[in-house]
Each structure stands twice: as C-alpha cells, then as structure tokens.
Amino acid sequence: MKNTLTVGAALLLTTSAAYAGGIDRSGQSIGAIFEDGTYVELSYGYVTPSVTGTFTVPAGPAAGLEFGSGNVAPAYGAAGLAFKSDINDDVSVAVIVDQPFGAAVDYSETDAGYPLAGTSANVNSTAITLVGQYNFNENLSVHFGPRYLSASGDYTAVVGGVPQYASTYESGNGSGYVAGVAYEREDIALRVALTYSSAIDLELDGSVGDLVAKMPESINLDFQSGVAADTLVFGSIRWAGWSDAFIKDSLLPAPLVSYDEDTLSYTLGVGRKFSDSFSGALSVGYEAAQGGAASNLAPTDGNMSIGLGGTYTVGNGMELTGGVRYVMPGDATTETIGAAFADNSAIAIGLKVAYTF
C-alpha cells in the first residue's frame, strides 16, 4: 500500500502548490527521500489560469467607465526530476530538481483604456537539492542537505500607453539548505515529516537596472496514515515567510514584488487502492486570503482547490501517475489603480513516471 498510494498523493500535493501564495509553484517537496530502494521519478505540471479584472475610472468626465484587463495570467509548465538511493541500511541520499518559484503576468489583452495595458513581468527559477537521510531506527529519521537556486526574469512597465521602464535580468543564483525530521510506522503507512527550507538571497544582472531578491524561508509538515484496509489519509501544511521576501529592481523606488503577510497553505486528501495495479486519490486545498490591496503583478488573494489523481502500476517497478486540480483564486483589488479581480480560476494538470529498482 505504501508506494502505490503515496506516489499519487504526492502528485496531488505538488499540483496544489502550482497556484499558491507568493510566487510558490512546486511546494519544495523532498518526498523522494522516503521512497523504498533505488528510485527515480520524472514529473511535469501544466497550469492554465484565467485571471481577469475591471478598472473603473474613479473621477473626471469619464467617471464610471469600465475597462477590462483581459486574462493577465499566461499558462505555464514546470518540470521536476528526482533520484534516490540507499547508501546502507541507515543512510540514503536523493537529488531533487524542481522549479520552486515563478510568476507570469501579461497585460497585452486589455481594453484600450486599461491603465497598465502593455505591462508584463516574468520570473523563472530552478533548484537543485541534495538531501541526505539518516535513520536512527525503523521509526525515526532526520534529513538535511544544501539547496542551490537559480532565477531569471524580465519586467516591462507601461502606464497610460506610455512605456515607463523595461529590464531583462540574466540568471543569478544563491544557496541555502533544508533540514528536517520524520517519524514512520510501516505497518499502518504512517509518516509525519517536518522540513525547514532556509531563505535564499539572489542577485541578477539586468539590461538596465539590476535585480535583488530574497526567496522566503518555509516549513512543510507532510503527513499520511492508513485508516482502513487499502485506504490512506494524507495532507500537508506549508508556511512560507513571504513578509520578509521581496523582488526589487535597483533603479525603481518600490519593490516589484513584496508582501505584508506570510502565507499558510493546507491540503487534505484520501487515497484508495482499488486493485493491485490501480489506486486513486482525492484532495482539497485552502489558503486564506491576506486582505488589503494586491499587487498588479499578482492580482489574486488566497485560493481554494479540489484535485483528483490516479496511479497505475506497470510490472514490479514502474508507476504512472496523473492528477488534475481545479483552483479558485481569491478575489482581490489591486494597489494604485484599484482594479477589481473576481471569479477567477486555474486548472493544474500533473503527470509523473516513477521507477523503483
């Protein structure tokens, strides 16, 4: 029951992070370190958001006129790779590659009178994490290791149809670490894992202004437990310190991205083994809205979601997993121009191929 159910559950936890607080995308999972034996996985997620808003002219002769933003959130994909191996009975290592942070906003489909028509911004990142695990006994273990993060991006500001600023940022990198502890009971498929990820500072050279950024520290609490024959309950709680994080251009007076509050995200689900070769999982996710004005580069606040996934076992070692999650981003009113964004949505699809040797 352990492997068949947890692979599908892990995919749903990953797709729940695909549209999460701040600019979180992967959720920074280190779940591969808990797989049995020598293990390799390749995953890919694709998200298609629909985020639209309306700007209402507040005063003057045109007061009350409304202009639509169009869909400001382009679709995006994210890939992941993990390899895990046992050194001996007590020590395991894993290499995990993911794309933990990212953002994309594009005001190219707006009505002609929308104040920010033509504005766009993109952030892309890739992380490589080396995790070592030491088992004190069959129940208690610790895990730790370094994380390397690289990022790149671009920003174009247009106000009232007049270009204001544009800079493209070459790839820059920084490093941090992960550390945690886990408790397991194989007889009931129980695992509770607590993982801390440190903040990472970045500096990116720009074509005009340079970029400095701080990606947040975070804590992930992941859990699962068998509750009946062939039935598993799983979930996660993720805290990310976005109130101390920022992305800032050296030539602009205000950060491009900053947040007043930290984020707290929850996922809870149930998995069921229907046969020796197939299992399914259903989960729900929630992130509370922070309130206040939202950035025009991230015009949503909080979210709710529901996901469905399934895993098919091929032979003795290969598992094919697919999952889909429907996300309902929270309504928001943006800073500066007061545009209202409401009734938005996103669909996240995830695929994973895993093989145990």
Image (cartoon, rainbow, N blue to C red):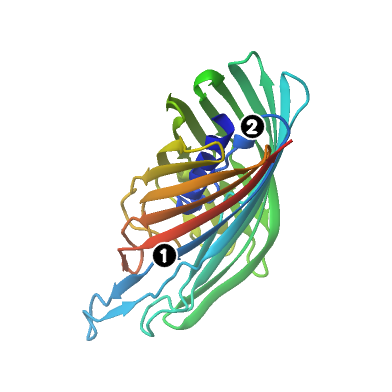
Q: Residue at x 53, y 19 (%)?
A: 187
- Residue that mark 2 sits on: 35
Residue 46 position in % (x across, y down): 54, 59
Q: Residue at x 56, y 21 (%)?
A: 186
Q: For this rendering, which residue is in front, 2 or 200?
A: 2
How packed is label 1: few (under 14 Cα within 10 Å), some, or many (20 or more)?
Answer: many
Residue 148 position in % (x across, y down): 70, 44
- Residue 322 relative to residue 307: left or right: right
Residue 216, visible in the rendered structure: no
Which picture quadrant has residue 44?
Answer: bottom right
Q: Quadrant of the N terminus?
A: top right
The disc, 1 or 2, on the residue closer to the chain's N-terminal end is 2
Q: How many marks?
A: 2
Q: For this rendering, which residue is in front, 184 or 328?
A: 184
Q: Residue at x 73, y 22 (%)?
A: 91
How packed is label 2: few (under 14 Cα within 10 Å), some, or many (20 or more)?
Answer: many
Q: For this rendering, which residue is in front, 154 or 97?
A: 97
- Residue 121 relative to residue 71: left or right: right
> How far apart are the alpha carbons under marks 1 and 2?
41 Å
- Element marked by disc 1: loop
Compared with 148, 53 (above or below) is below
Q: Quadrant of the C terminus?
A: top right
Kindly identify which numbered label has been placed on residue 296.
Answer: 1
